[in-house]
Amino acid sequence: MHWLIGVLVLLAVCAASPGGAEAGPYRGRVIDADTKEPLAGAVVLVYWNLFLIAPGHPERFLASDEAVTDGRGEFAVGSNPPRAAIPGTRVSRPHLSILRPGWAPFPFGHTAPPWPPGGEDALLERMQQGAIIIELPRLKTLAEGERILDLLDPFAVPQERIPRMMEAFYTARRQLKLLP
């Protein structure tokens, strides 16, 4: 009986606590690291997972938003972040990726901005306050491109929810002459 009371108290606390990183939008400007010219057409993806607060339960996809940088390299994503509507669940922090075929993707290959002391969470917080400049270096070798593309996991989000990111991912693979 005591364990049941403990579970009920935990569920009540979880239901009363915020559902995760409810923030946004995340703004930025993507530029070429060498030329400092804007990178139009880069795909920006933000996604969130849902997880149970009880240990040992895997996260599962909850929601995503994607955008394409404009002629100035600017973007805004995540204007409507999801909420955890089920008691005992939380929304993960946002996961942000930027991909432009021919350039190293964010967060694996960017050259600027440097990671702040708080890591990616602190960077996302800065992106909520105003647009930050993200520099992506051009890929110089096939081996470099293969190594960095292997770090990307576009399958963390259902493909039908991110058509632009999947198109950019497969375009980048074709440019590197990799199998789809």
Image (tube, rainbow, N blue to C red):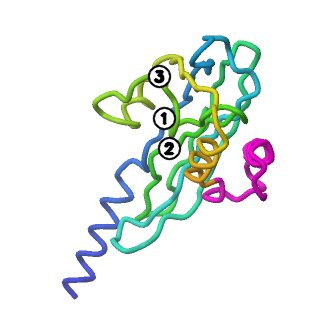
Please provide the residue range marked out in magenta: 154-180
Q: Counting residues from the N terminus, which is met first, the one under dot 3 or under dot 2?
A: 2
Q: Nearer the viewer, mark 1 or mark 3?
A: 3
Q: Secondary structure at mark 2?
A: loop
User: Is 11 located above or below residue 106 in the figure?
Assistant: below
Query: Looking at the image, do the residues carrying marks 3 and 2 touch, with CB atoms under 8 Å apart?
Result: no
Pick whichever, 166 or 67, lies toward us.
166
Which x, y percent locates residue 36?
Answer: 60, 11
As drawn, the residue found furthest toward the bottom would be 1
Q: Secondary structure at mark 3?
A: loop
How far apart marks 3 and 2 lie (CA) works out to 20 Å
How far apart marks 1 and 2 lie (CA) works out to 9 Å
Q: Nearer the viewer, mark 1 or mark 2?
A: 2
User: Is 86 located above or below residue 81 in the figure?
Assistant: below
Residue 59 falls left or right of residue 165: left
Residue at x 78%, y 55% (from the top left corner): 160
Q: Which residue is mark 2?
A: 94
Give neighbour class at mark 2: few <14, some 14-19, many 20+ (Cα, 10 Å). many
Q: Which residue is mark 3?
A: 112
Identify which amino acid the numbered label 1 is placed on: Ala
Q: Counting residues from the N terminus, which is met first, the one under dot 1 or under dot 3?
A: 1
Give neighbour class at mark 1: few <14, some 14-19, many 20+ (Cα, 10 Å). some
Which x, y percent locates residue 9?
Answer: 26, 68
Pick whichever, 122 or 165, lies toward us.
165
How far apart marks 1 and 3 lie (CA) works out to 23 Å
Q: Which residue is mark 1?
A: 23
Identify which amino acid the numbered label 2 is placed on: Pro
Query: Looking at the image, do the residues carrying marks 1 and 2 touch, with CB atoms under 8 Å apart?
Result: yes
Quadrant assignment for the N terminus: bottom left
Quadrant assignment for the C terminus: bottom right
Residue at x 36%, y 65% (from the top left corner): 53
User: Is 67 located above or below residue 5 in the figure?
Assistant: above
